[in-house]
Amino acid sequence: MAEPDLKLLEAALREAGVLVRALRAKPLEVTSKGAAGPVTNIDFAVNELLAERLRSARPDYGWLSEESPDAPDTRMSKARTFMLDPIDGTQAMIDGAADFAISLGVVHGATAHAGAIYLPMTDEMFLGAAGEGATLNGAAIRASTRAELEGAHIIGKRGFYKQIPWRTPWPETAFTAVQAIATRLAYIAAGRFDATILYGPKNEWDIAAGAAIIAAAGGRFTDARGAPIVFNNRTPKAPGAVAAGAQIHPLIIDRTKHFPHRIPD
């Protein structure tokens, strides 16, 4: 059943949120992972806490985290796997923004089954699982029901959509940039925005929770051609994604499936 996992995810992330807020009140310890970007003592502390809590509670689950060594043979042999990004939007956190998130998904087989995304600085807990629906701090949420692109509100940079030579130009829409991928996906699940496009390979720990919550909220989460995302791969990356309300999703896929190039997010 999904419900026990959701309760576990929420409890673990709320505990991690207390830790984040305490550590963020002190000077950050920032180092670089090169092309993978910065990492802080908070990333490592959250990873350590959640690894202890979750792996002891579900010893039969696999484990994939941005801040842990991967063991693909072990992970892929498990029926269910935790997929964690201890801090999604590390640069945003370093810059003093509040919209970074802790992202924790449960993958069943190759499918995102349950997820929790928690914004510790705003105390927003997004939860969702197959057959359970989706919630924000306990209140039910639903993805957008918009059925046309004209007037849509998209998470993304205006220049990306207006300057790239799309096969069909985008109609007049509103754009808002949000750095953290998990936060973007949580906002799509809650219907705050209509859609977002994640181009270029994405780590599975960035998107597993959001994929589960969006599906539970009645939205769609697929690759750029409309096919389901397959999770728990040996190399845990997905080829980009389109996340949107169910009605507007096919209109976006009709554009993205024709674009011949990989576009950086």
Image (cartoon, rainbow, N blue to C red):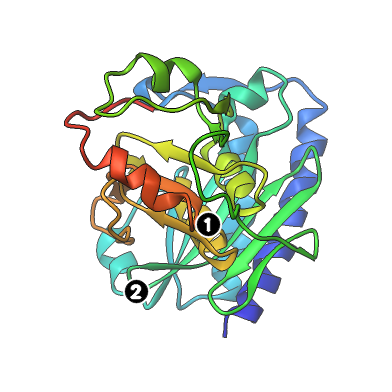
- Indicate whether 169 appears above or below 58: above
In the drawing, does residue 93 fall left or right of residue 215?
right
Kindly identify the residue that appears in the image at 30 percent across and 54 percent down: 226
Give the quarter of the figure containing the C terminus: top left
**Res 193 quadrant in image:** top right
- Indicate whether 161 appears above or below 143: above
Q: Is residue 127 visible?
A: yes
Circle 1 SS class = helix
Q: Position of residue 30 (x, y in %)?
A: 58, 21
Which amino acid type corresponds to the residue marked 1 in the rendered image?
Ala
Which amino acid type corresponds to the residue marked 2 in the rendered image?
Gly
Q: Which residue is mark 1?
A: 209
Kindly identify the residue that appears in the image at 68 percent across and 56 percent down: 126
Dot 2 or dot 1, earlier in sequence: 2
Q: Which residue is mark 2?
A: 109
Q: Position of residue 117 (x, y in %)?
A: 63, 52
In the drawing, does residue 15 fall left or right of residue 54?
right
Q: Label 2 to label 1, Cα distance in Å? A: 14 Å
187 or 50: nearer the viewer: 187
Kindly identify the residue that appears in the image at 45 percent across and 44 percent down: 66
Q: Residue furthest bottom?
A: 1
Q: Position of residue 183 (x, y in %)?
A: 61, 41
